[in-house]
Image (cartoon, rainbow, N blue to C red):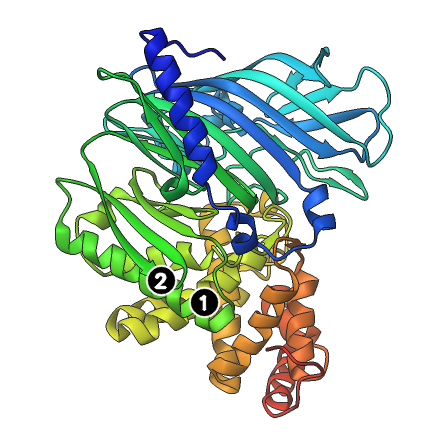
Amino acid sequence: MKWRVATNLIVILVLLQMIVGCMWRPATTEAHISQTSSQQEAVRTKYAANVQIDPDKHAVTGTLSARFPVKDQQKAYFHLYSNAFVERPELSTPNWLYILGENRIEGKMTIHDVRVKEKPVPFKVNQTILEVPFDKPVAQGEAVTVSMNFTLQVPKNDGRLSYDDHAIWLGNWLPILAVNESAGWRLDPYLPIGDPFYSEVADYDVQIRVPHQYQIATTGLESLAVVTETRPKGFKFYDIQALNVRDFAVVAMDDSYRSITAKVGETLVNTWYRVDDQMDAVMRVHDVAKKSLQYYSKSFGVYPYQEYDVVRTGGFFGGMEYPSIVFIQDKYFETPGGYGDAVVAHETAHQWFYGVVGNDEIKEAWVDESLTDYATMVFLQQYDKKSANEYIKRRVTRGNMAASLYAEQKISAWQSVDQFPNWPSYSDLVYSRGGAMLWNLRQTWGEERVNEALRYYYTTHQYKNATGKDVVDAFTKVAGESANPYFDYWLRLKPEMEKPAFNWSIRGKSKVPTMNTK
């Protein structure tokens, strides 16, 4: 994509600024984000994007290239999640209406000029899947570059990808390489329940153009970004890097937005709000964000990224997590405390469980959500007992009831999201039942012993995709014997495992861990 500026002089000045900016970009960014080996870095996908955000037209145009080592010698697949919002009859069903709302405007991503190794190829788009054939077989393990041009008409709805009069929030918007497992490509559709996403960590280098009165918050490092601006009243150009992350989200905000910044360890916490928001509510959001980040770092392992953005958006979801950035629903910037505390604490905990340690959110949604909801409860209890007691009571009550509510329906927490009939069943089982499971264990073991298992899980699987079995294995190591009975009772709703589960938790309270989890 080509961008034009008013005069040749401006072009020269912009280039000079970019060159100078690149000279002072810190060389330690990757070292701070990850201590992974050079071999791990070599196999990470490298995305490079150049995009223009047009808030007036609610559109994004740009180019994307992805360089990755080949597993399939014939082709590659990318997710085009934004095509889920092309108008069709199923969007009017209850589960879709829950996330989109009644008043929606469709959106779509159009792909142009797909190339492999700079040669055009006859690509295919099937709803949310882009198939890219190789013109000739590529040796397994060889790095190949796929590039494309795209145009995104941003949909308007209550979801993760939308806009209002002051901002555009772009979640799950860029084409992203599908996960290629040993059994083959994972080409899951965009489902109307849960967070139906599954990705691997990658490196992003994204250039973003916005109108001069706009500013952005992203997964990357805005504080270290090279920012240039054309005059008079032209455009801002951001050059953003985000390394070792499993997605790249953006919010473009007009000049009605402001930010509050604090330092937590080595991380800048930025809370973005509108000038007409209630400042006591804004300060509460900011306080929960920075204190929960500090608490989880101490409890589970240090947060490895240099920035964390908490951004006011619209949406049905309360909050939505992405690496280094979360979207928080606008109503929590209007009234301080209450359920808003839990939303911010929950999305912050996702930075550990989903962000740094990924998982298959389609087949095993409980892995990140249950751990995250437990973390939310333990943080809230030491932050604000009144707020915590209300939240914990609701979660534990629903979690305990889930066994009788859903056993006859033959659904449980440990299943794919497409097997849940509706959002209430998903919430009761994946959030409440899973969170109550760990809360119950905390009552027996104590918080520190539960944290031992979670620290081991976190440190062992950083920047990887973990499984439910990995979570069970972490608790097995701390308990000194198999944790399967406990997880089978709570997550698979096996009533015959109630007594073995109880006995396991009692014996595990005092046993010496089978390996050091610190």
Residue 207, how many percent across, how many down?
A: 46, 27
> Image point 15% across, 44% down: which residue?
277
Comes first in the chain, label 1 or label 2: 2
Residue 478, how many percent across, how many down?
A: 64, 80
Identify which residue, 18 or 313, lies in the foreground: 18
In the image, is residue 214 above or below residue 330? above
In the image, is residue 423 above or below residue 61? below
**Residues under labels 1 and 2: Cα distance?**
10 Å
- Amino acid at pointer 1: Ser
In the picture, residue 96 is in which quadrant? top left
Q: Which residue is disc 2 drawn over?
A: 264
Left or right: where 93 falls relative to 213: right
Residue 413, how many percent across, how many down?
A: 58, 58
Q: Badges 1 and 2: C-beta atoms under 8 Å apart? A: yes
Q: Which residue is disc 1 drawn over?
A: 297
> Image point 56% across, 41% down: which residue?
196
Task: Report whether residue 96 is seen.
Answer: no
